[in-house]
Amino acid sequence: MSAKEEILSRITSALRDAPAPEPIPREYRVSSDMPEAELIELLVDRLEDYKAHVDVVDLPHLPATLAERLKDATSFVVPHGIDAEWLVEAAPTDSARLRTDAPGAVLSVTELDHTDAVLTSSAVSIAESGTIVLDGTPNQGRRAISLVPDHHVCVVPVSSIVRLLPEALPRMDITRPLTWISGPSATSDIELERVEGVHGPRQLDVIIVKGL
């Protein structure tokens, strides 16, 4: 018998006479019929409360908005699956400013640390908690690129916004590396002093895109 089997056997033996657990009530909300405009408004409210900057734009205005948000970055990284049309104004000709992270050509931690910003899309967003989920698909990239640079510009398609967590979970592939983002990285020490950038980007710009 392995150590694991012995431990589990002892636990089973210890619990043999224990009373059956009470059924867990599952009466929480699992769906919502909130209209799109209200979903957007709720998500914006939550994100801004977390100190994120939020734009709500139509798809044709996305390239200009990205260019504006990235204008101060001397360099920025994108995952290999990002839509090239999004970048026509942010990096139309300056290839030195744009860095692409791709399988077989990943940027090192040092390279990412010397990159000012990152641009990704997102998988699903939960309006009620102001949470954006990245799942590592080609237009979002591996987790490191969204955690090391100090500035994250994240595109949120309106079609990916739900109100409740139970609505979001069926849209996710839980076997993928999920990154859950609720505002810029921040924590507080024992004196309740807010410290930003400890676990990820200090600055989060969210662009909610209608028609996407």
Image: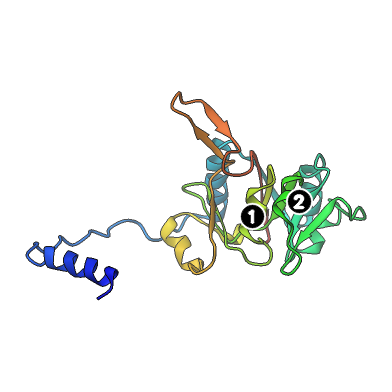
Give the farthest residue toward the bottom: 1
Between 206 and 118, the one nearer to me in the picture: 118
Q: Secondary structure at mark 1?
A: helix
The spot of residue 73 in percent (x, y) is 80, 42
Q: Is residue 80 above or below residue 154?
A: below
Quarter of the image where the N terminus is located? bottom left
Instruction: Tell me if mark 1 has few (under 14), some (14-19) or many (20+) residues whose alpha carbon lies within 10 angstroms of its own.
Output: some
Mark sitting earlier along the chain (1/2)? 2
Q: Secondary structure at mark 2?
A: helix
Label 1 to label 2: alpha-carbon separation: 11 Å
Q: Amino acid under label 2?
A: Glu
Depth check, mark 1 against mark 2: the one in front is 2
The spot of residue 112 in percent (x, y) is 73, 50
Give the farthest residue toward the top: 191
Say whether residue 22 is left or right of residue 186. Answer: left
Between 63 and 196, the one nearer to me in the picture: 196
Residue 27 in view: yes
Residue drawn 73% across the image and 49% down it: 110
Which residue in the protein does label 1 denote?
Answer: 144
Q: Amino acid under label 1?
A: Ala
Q: Is residue 192 above or below residue 139?
A: above
Question: Residue 54 is drawn in which quadrant?
Answer: top right
Which residue in the protein does label 2 denote?
Answer: 111
